[in-house]
Amino acid sequence: MYTALGAGVCVKRAILLALAVIPVAMNLDAQNAKGASTQKDVEARIQAVESCLLPPVLVEGEPKPCTPLLKRMAELHVTAVSIAVVHNGAIEWARGYGVRQIGGEPVNTETLFQAGSISKPVAALGTLHLVEQGKLSLDSDINASLTSWKVPPSAAAPGAVVTLRELLTHTAGMTVHGFPGYEAGAPVPTLVQVLNGEKPANTDPIRVDSVPGKTWRYSGGGFTVMQQAVLGVVKEPYPKFLHDTVLAPIGMTHSTYEQPLPQAMTGNVATPYEADGTPVKGGPHTYPEMAAAGLWTTPSDICRYILEVENSLAGKANHVLSPAMTRQMLTPGIGGWGLGVEVGGSATNLWFTHGGVNEGYESDFFAYDNHGDGVAVMTNAQGGGRLAGEVVSAIAEAYNWPDRRPVVHTLVKVDPALLARYAGTYKASEGTITFLAEGNQLIVQFSNGTKIPVFPESQTKFFLKVATAEYEFVTDDKGQVSSVLMHQGTLTIKGIRQ
């Protein structure tokens, strides 16, 4: 057994001494496309990414803390990172960094990772394909499509009807944010047992606990209900349905929703690690909640999903959905979410994105609707999502994208007495958050006890340096601090002072 310190040292040695960079051949379509990059351009961008990862937030006037990718991997105990970039409508480059496990073989572009919640937007393609075939309805009662299980009546929302559209947009009022999976060798529940929270399921029952269609709240539970509805229609194993309907038609040849991973595919897998650099006990967890968290894939295959969406919108390749349905999928609703994917941006720079977290795997992808650009990054460590986000940001810088680059804030001075006014506990639908005033510093404390300093950019607005989250304090008509608005990306959550 490694101690936490020992594991960290081993990880750093594995990365710094055995790190490998495995390039993939350039896509000829990208080379020949109008305005395509030259090989020299591409290598310069790769070098920029490899040499300088920036934090998500910069402060005006302060030096930029630039960290090489290899060093950042060592700092975060990430042994394996895989990256693929879409530019001018093709995969321009893909590379693997590090080793699949400590002391093991180098990562290459075909090394498999668990995608976590990136499973959702890919699974959504298959569900929407059934909608276009008339086998499912976006706006009818989902119980009409459920056979062996039904959404139970809700005391919190009597008479409520849940629709597929609400499940896909996280507005169904469903419980269960995400799933921890099941250790190797542990009993794995059926999907109905997961839905009912019955042993050996390790999560609560998936139920409606607020009025559907009114608010946005992320729910892997809702996608599990969707999976059950699809099974009732297709009458075949879920992995086979998604392989035949989505993965194979769009060229995701190194991907599967099979859980656990078939033995024949285990030869090139990144071993999952905890945040302290110790391996996940027993290896990859098993996820029967396949639509929510069951995809095994590579960044290059995620980029093939990105290209399918971009090409479908343009009417160039519609292997799964029509242009009209693809556009509907990317139309923002409550909370800035489309059907299975987060969407946003300006009128000329619309984008779609999703992150993914499974036990020991964290990933991110980001792409534009009409630019022919995008990126996917996968890691094999808890906390690797932070690295993935920094890589996406570095790529946005290298390609001069208008989004996902570091946010720049201006730091101002505020009276410590004002910080004391903001101190207190605020309650939102997602939980509570507490602000502490310690001297001249305001600190945010999350429900798990984590404390992070926040910094003022005005007398009412504060920001984090470690993430792109901002806090705006609101006063009532009597001048008393009554609430805080928590902004992150397209999402705003209101917390009421207690």
Image (spheres, helix red, strand yellow):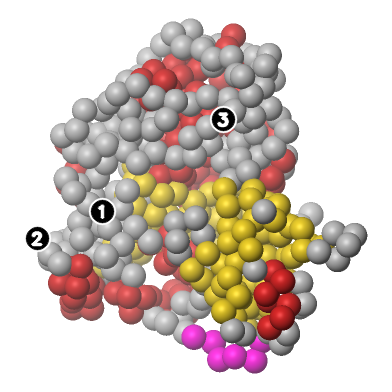
Graded by Cα atoms within 10 Å as few (under 14), some (14 to 19) or many (20 or more), the crowding at tag 3 reads: many
The residue at the point 64 percent across, 48 percent down is 428
Q: Earlier in the sequence, mark 1 or mark 3?
A: 3
Q: Which mark is residue 1?
A: 2
Out of 473 and 79, give the one closest to the viewer: 473
Q: Amino acid at mark 3?
A: Met
Q: Position of residue 332 (x, y in %)?
A: 72, 42
Residue under label 3, please give it. 174
Graded by Cα atoms within 10 Å as few (under 14), some (14 to 19) or many (20 or more), the crowding at tag 2 reads: few
Residue under label 1, please give it. 272
Q: Quadrant of residue 17?
A: bottom left
Q: Position of residue 1 (x, y in %)?
A: 9, 60
Which secondary structure, mark 2? loop
Q: Quadrant of residue 8?
A: bottom left
Q: Earlier in the sequence, mark 1 or mark 2?
A: 2
Q: CA distance from mark 2 to mark 3?
A: 40 Å
Question: In the rendered structure, does residue 1 fall within the stretch colored magenta?
Answer: no
Question: In the rendered structure, does residue 63 fall within the stretch colored magenta?
Answer: yes
Q: Position of residue 426 (x, y in %)?
A: 64, 56
Out of 230 and 284, give the one closest to the viewer: 284
The residue stretch that appears in magenta: 60-65
Q: Going by the image, does 267 lie left or right of 427?
A: left
Out of 187 and 52, give the one closest to the viewer: 187
Residue 193 seen in render: yes
Q: Nearer the viewer, mark 1 or mark 3?
A: 3
Q: Position of residue 445 (x, y in %)?
A: 52, 64
Q: Amino acid at mark 1?
A: Pro
Which secondary structure, mark 1? loop
The residue at the point 44 percent across, 56 percent down is 448
